[in-house]
Image (cartoon, coloured by chain):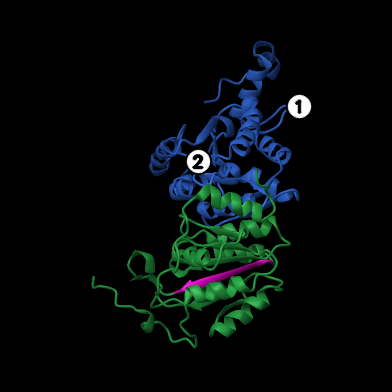
Amino acid sequence: MAPAEKPMSSRKSHQPTSDRKALDGKTSGEKAPHEQAWHDVVLETFKRNDIRLIPYVPDRVLTTLIRTLHADPFFTTFPTAREEEAVGIVSGAWMGGMRGAVLMQTSGFATLANVLASLAVPYQIPLIMLVSERGTLGEFNYGQSLVCHTMRPVLDSLAMEHHTATRLDEFEFVVDRSIKQAVATQAPVALILSPLLTGGKVFEQ
Amino acid sequence: MSEPVSKPSHRPARNTKVMNRFDITSRLVAKLKNEEAVIGGIGNTNFDLWAAGRRPQNFYMLGSMGLAFPIALGVALAQPERRVFALEGDGSLLMQIGCLSTIAMLAPKNLCMIVMDNGVYQITGAQPTPAAAVSDIVAIAAGCGLADSAWAADEEDFERLVDQSLSASGPMLIGVRIDDRPGVGTTRRDPVQIRERFMMGLGVRQAL
């Protein structure tokens, strides 16, 4: 996945700025001083859109995001036993005037078809979901790869808006616009965080 | 495997009267004077809430079995000054029992959970739940960390517990043993109108 490493100065001279950002984000998760990591983009875009309530079922890729959300008193961040439960909580909070978003992994999304079809979609609730994508681009667990294949067909079958974020330079735009669209249209949205953006989880021997 | 034989009468002995869902729901609603929110779980639980008199602060679930307490938790977190009640069936709660730990951890002061326990999936033909003959839902709640969990001994005791919850400083759970009578009314299945009216009732939206 990672291109052959070149000295920073050489890459700088050959790549347009936006491409360079994306490459930096997806190869190592490291960042130049002037740019943010993907998880900082999530935190700040949530804040700017007044998204305060963050129930989650954890995932390895989400570790830093979850830690920084917990550390920031702007957010009410807490784990739930199931993703469905988290969807219920942010749905109730939204009806009570507080915005939220649910963090989960692909396998967690696979437990949600019923609550999406019977609560979020028919009641027109702007449910915002961040799904860390397991099961592709270097997956080592066949079960994860199979469950990943169920995700987009479920989203499409409910005509739900979803985007797969792969590039850091587009990421803020995708997150910000998706949140605003969900709220304006009162419709759920799923933001799928590709390993191209996050680095994913790889098998370590 | 043989047919499960458990019936309400075979359950662990409890010093609690078998009450009626509609009657209990009506007693709750009669006590609500401060625009308290009420979330009615799927099926007969919200049918009886509907029949007990429409209030703008009522939310009626038409699916998402097991999510009455999580939805109520969300409302309680969003509006900490408002008291929030959730009505859930025992079978529904079994589907999402982990939410009791989440609620115990967050310990919202303004949330009161009421479990209507008849030991059966009444709406699908009154088949016994797996918990019916063996489990005590109030003990499960206490074990999840909801220290203020109690069975209502009778209607009077239920009303006393509701009064207590209206000034409680932590979440409460009230277990009510009920008969297997179906709901008295039928909720009108209009999810957008239900949600919109609820949001207006909570002061989040104004009518167009």
Q: Secondary structure at mark 1?
A: loop
Quickly name the residue at label 2. Answer: A204
Query: Which amino acid does the dot numbered 2 rest on?
Result: Glu
Q: Nearer the viewer, residue B12 or B111?
A: B111
Chain B as rendered: colour: green
State the predominant SS element of the stretch in magenta: strand
* Location of residue A199 in the rendering, given as x and y in whole percent from the top left corner: 56, 33
Amino acid at dot 1: His
Q: Is residue A134 visible?
A: yes
For the magenta stretch, what is the residue range?
Answer: B110-117
**Dot 2 surroundings within 10 Å: few (below 14), some, or many (20 or more)?**
few
Q: Is residue B149 above or below residue B58?
A: below
Residue A97 forms part of the magenta stretch: no
Q: Answer whether residue B115 is magenta in the image.
A: yes
Disc 1 packing (10 Å; few <14; some 14–19; many ≥20)? few
Which label lies toward us, 1 or 2? 1
